[in-house]
Protein backbone atom coordinates (compact mmCIF):
# COMPACT_ATOMS: atom_id res chain seq x y z
CA UNK A 1 0.00 0.00 0.00
CA UNK A 2 2.91 2.35 0.68
CA UNK A 3 4.14 1.93 -2.89
CA UNK A 4 0.65 2.76 -4.19
CA UNK A 5 0.58 5.88 -2.03
CA UNK A 6 4.02 6.92 -3.33
CA UNK A 7 2.85 6.39 -6.90
CA UNK A 8 -0.30 8.41 -6.18
CA UNK A 9 1.81 11.33 -4.96
CA UNK A 10 4.19 11.12 -7.94
CA UNK A 11 1.27 11.18 -10.39
CA UNK A 12 -0.50 14.03 -8.58
CA UNK A 13 2.75 16.01 -8.37
CA UNK A 14 3.08 15.59 -12.16
CA UNK A 15 -0.24 17.41 -12.50
CA UNK A 16 -2.65 14.54 -13.11
CA UNK A 17 -5.92 13.79 -11.36
CA UNK A 18 -5.60 10.49 -9.53
CA UNK A 19 -8.33 7.86 -9.55
CA UNK A 20 -7.47 5.23 -6.98
CA UNK A 21 -5.38 3.60 -5.87
CA UNK A 22 -7.34 0.41 -6.32
CA UNK A 23 -6.18 -2.34 -3.99
CA UNK A 24 -7.83 -5.27 -5.79
CA UNK A 25 -8.98 -6.34 -9.23
CA UNK A 26 -12.66 -5.75 -8.40
CA UNK A 27 -11.95 -2.12 -7.44
CA UNK A 28 -9.84 -1.63 -10.58
CA UNK A 29 -12.58 -3.04 -12.81
CA UNK A 30 -15.14 -0.79 -11.14
CA UNK A 31 -12.95 2.30 -11.61
CA UNK A 32 -12.31 1.40 -15.26
CA UNK A 33 -16.04 0.96 -15.93
CA UNK A 34 -17.26 4.01 -14.02
CA UNK A 35 -14.58 6.62 -14.78
CA UNK A 36 -13.54 8.26 -18.04
CA UNK A 37 -9.82 7.57 -17.89
CA UNK A 38 -7.19 9.25 -20.06
CA UNK A 39 -4.61 6.65 -19.04
CA UNK A 40 -3.65 4.32 -16.24
CA UNK A 41 -0.71 3.01 -14.30
CA UNK A 42 -1.34 -0.58 -13.31
CA UNK A 43 0.64 -2.27 -10.58
CA UNK A 44 1.02 -5.89 -11.68
CA UNK A 45 0.68 -7.24 -8.15
CA UNK A 46 -2.51 -6.41 -6.26
CA UNK A 47 -1.99 -8.36 -3.06
CA UNK A 48 -2.71 -11.97 -3.97
CA UNK A 49 -4.15 -11.02 -7.40
CA UNK A 50 -2.63 -9.96 -10.69
CA UNK A 51 -3.98 -6.94 -12.58
CA UNK A 52 -4.56 -8.72 -15.92
CA UNK A 53 -8.41 -8.52 -15.93
CA UNK A 54 -8.15 -4.73 -15.49
CA UNK A 55 -5.51 -4.51 -18.22
CA UNK A 56 -7.74 -6.52 -20.56
CA UNK A 57 -10.70 -4.20 -19.90
CA UNK A 58 -8.64 -1.04 -20.43
CA UNK A 59 -7.25 -2.53 -23.63
CA UNK A 60 -10.81 -3.21 -24.87
CA UNK A 61 -11.79 0.36 -23.97
CA UNK A 62 -8.80 1.81 -25.79
CA UNK A 63 -7.41 3.39 -22.61
CA UNK A 64 -3.60 3.60 -22.73
CA UNK A 65 -1.84 2.14 -19.72
CA UNK A 66 1.56 1.21 -18.47
CA UNK A 67 2.58 -1.46 -16.02
CA UNK A 68 4.58 -1.09 -12.83
CA UNK A 69 6.26 -4.11 -11.33
CA UNK A 70 8.96 -5.23 -9.00
CA UNK A 71 8.97 -8.64 -10.68
CA UNK A 72 10.70 -10.03 -13.73
CA UNK A 73 9.24 -9.47 -17.19
CA UNK A 74 8.56 -13.21 -17.29
CA UNK A 75 5.59 -12.41 -15.00
CA UNK A 76 3.98 -10.29 -17.74
CA UNK A 77 1.78 -12.17 -20.25
CA UNK A 78 2.98 -11.95 -23.84
CA UNK A 79 -0.05 -9.84 -24.84
CA UNK A 80 1.22 -7.05 -22.57
CA UNK A 81 4.98 -7.33 -23.05
CA UNK A 82 5.01 -4.54 -25.64
CA UNK A 83 3.48 -2.10 -23.12
CA UNK A 84 5.65 0.38 -21.29
CA UNK A 85 6.84 -1.34 -18.13
CA UNK A 86 8.24 0.59 -15.17
CA UNK A 87 10.30 -1.17 -12.58
CA UNK A 88 9.71 -0.35 -8.92
CA UNK A 89 10.72 1.63 -7.06
CA UNK A 90 9.51 4.29 -9.47
CA UNK A 91 11.54 7.38 -10.20
CA UNK A 92 9.79 10.69 -10.93
CA UNK A 93 11.68 11.26 -14.19
CA UNK A 94 11.00 7.74 -15.46
CA UNK A 95 7.33 8.08 -14.58
CA UNK A 96 7.01 11.37 -16.46
CA UNK A 97 8.72 9.91 -19.52
CA UNK A 98 6.51 6.82 -19.39
CA UNK A 99 3.35 8.93 -19.16
CA UNK A 100 4.53 10.85 -22.21
CA UNK A 101 4.76 7.57 -24.15
CA UNK A 102 1.03 7.19 -23.46
CA UNK A 103 0.43 10.60 -25.00
CA UNK A 104 -0.31 12.19 -21.63
CA UNK A 105 1.09 15.60 -20.88
CA UNK A 106 0.99 17.68 -17.75
CA UNK A 107 -1.97 20.09 -18.02
Image: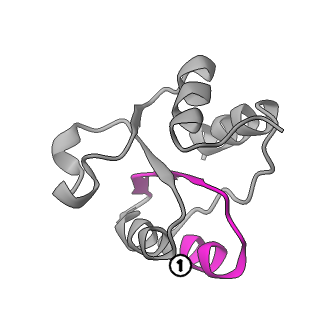
Q: Nearer the viewer, residue 28 or 61?
A: 61
Q: Nearer the viewer, residue 33 or 45?
A: 33
Name the residue located 55 percent from the left edge and 26 percent from the top edge.
97
Q: Which colour scheme is used?
A: one colour
Left or right: 62 in relation to 81: right
Q: Compared to 97, does 71 lie above or below?
A: below
> What quarter of the picture does the C terminus occupy?
top right
Residue 47 percent location from the top left of the image: 44, 58
Q: Is mark 1 on a helix, strand or loop?
A: helix
Name the residue located 24 percent from the left edge and 51 percent from the top edge.
76
Q: Compared to 12, does 40 lie above or below?
A: below
Residue 87 percent location from the top left of the image: 39, 30
Q: Tell whether position 20 is magenta.
A: no
Badge 1 density bin: few <14, some 14–19, many ≥20, Cα 10 Å: few
Q: Compared to 58, does 18 lie above or below?
A: above
List the single residue furthest toward the front.
103
Q: Tell whether position 41 is magenta.
A: yes
Where does the magenta region start and end? 26-46
Check disc 1 and report the residue beneath it. Answer: 26
Residue 23 percent location from the top left of the image: 58, 62
Q: In which image quadrant can residue 52 be found?
A: bottom left
Q: In which image quadrant can residue 11 be found?
A: top right
Left or right: 97 in relation to 15: left
Residue 106 percent location from the top left of the image: 77, 35
Left or right: 59 in relation to 64: left
Left or right: 78 in relation to 98: left
Q: Compared to 40, does 25 lie above or below?
A: below
Q: Which of 62 and 56 is in front in this view?
A: 62
Name the residue located 22 percent from the left edge and 60 percent from the top edge.
79
Amino acid sequence: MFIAMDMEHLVADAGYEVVGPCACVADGLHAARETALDGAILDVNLGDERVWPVADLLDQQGVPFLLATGYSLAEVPKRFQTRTILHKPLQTGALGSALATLGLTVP
